[in-house]
Amino acid sequence: MQIFSTFEHSINLELAISSLEENGIQKEHIFAVPLANRKKERNLFDSIHNADGISLVSTGAALGTAFSVIGASIGFKLQWGPIYWGLIGAISGFLLGFLIDLFYYKIVRRSHRILRGKRPEVILIIECDEAKGDTVEHILWHHFALGTARIG
């Protein structure tokens, strides 16, 4: 049987491997595959085939609506009237919201990702007998595996 598990690349992975070896799993039956992190930044603008859940339009739509109502209300007292001032408010609110979201996702979130230091993950594949399957899985969970799966 094979047991697959994922770990963050940390000391817990090394401890799990040494515990497995102490419990009779040979080195030849333990296989670790490190995953590479994404090197390319995410696209902020989605295409029709690819969307990542980040919207640069939502804040712009909310501020555009609010500024449009305010512009139309004040526009009754101004020279161009409520329609033009409502449109001016909608466009300026949308642009302001768009720029706020763009700044947030390009500057603020990027610096949080860099400060947090996303660790790469490692897939650990262990080949063992059915009898040792529960012990191996217990060792993996004890050393903070992110997830496990059994095959066979």
Image (cartoon, helix red, strand yellow):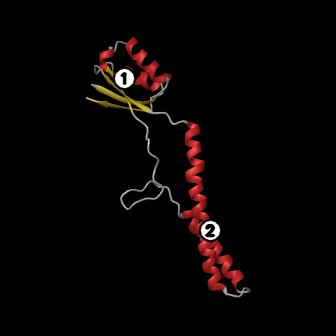
Amino acid under label 2?
A: Leu
Per the image, the residue denoted by label 1 is: 134
* Residue at image location 58% in from the left, 66% down from the top: 60
Q: What mark, if any, has residue 63 been given in the picture?
A: 2
Q: What mark, if any, has residue 35 been given in the picture?
A: none
Q: Earlier in the sequence, mark 1 or mark 2?
A: 2
Residue toward you, 144 or 10: 10
Could you say whether the residue bearing mark 1 is in a helix, strand or loop?
Answer: helix
- Label 1 or label 2, whichever lies nearer to me, is 2
* Residue at image location 69% in from the left, 83% down from the top: 75
Amino acid under label 1?
A: Asp
Total labels: the figure holds 2
Is the residue under label 2 in contact with that under label 1 (CB below 8 Å)? no
Above or below 19: residue 122: below
Residue toward you, 20 or 14: 14
- x then y, percent, for residue 77: 74, 86
Residue toward you, 131 or 140: 140
CA neighbours of label 1 inside 10 A, class few (<14), some (14 to 19), many (20+): few
* Residue at image location 43% in from the left, 59% down from the top: 46
Quarter of image, res 5: top left
Q: Quadrant of the N terminus?
A: top left
Quarter of image, res 127: top left
| Left or right for 74, reference 119 | right
- x then y, percent, for residue 133: 33, 22
- x then y, percent, for residue 81: 67, 87
Separation of disc 1 and disc 2 at Cα? 56 Å
- x then y, percent, for residue 130: 28, 21
Could you say whether the residue bearing mark 2 is in a helix, strand or loop?
Answer: helix
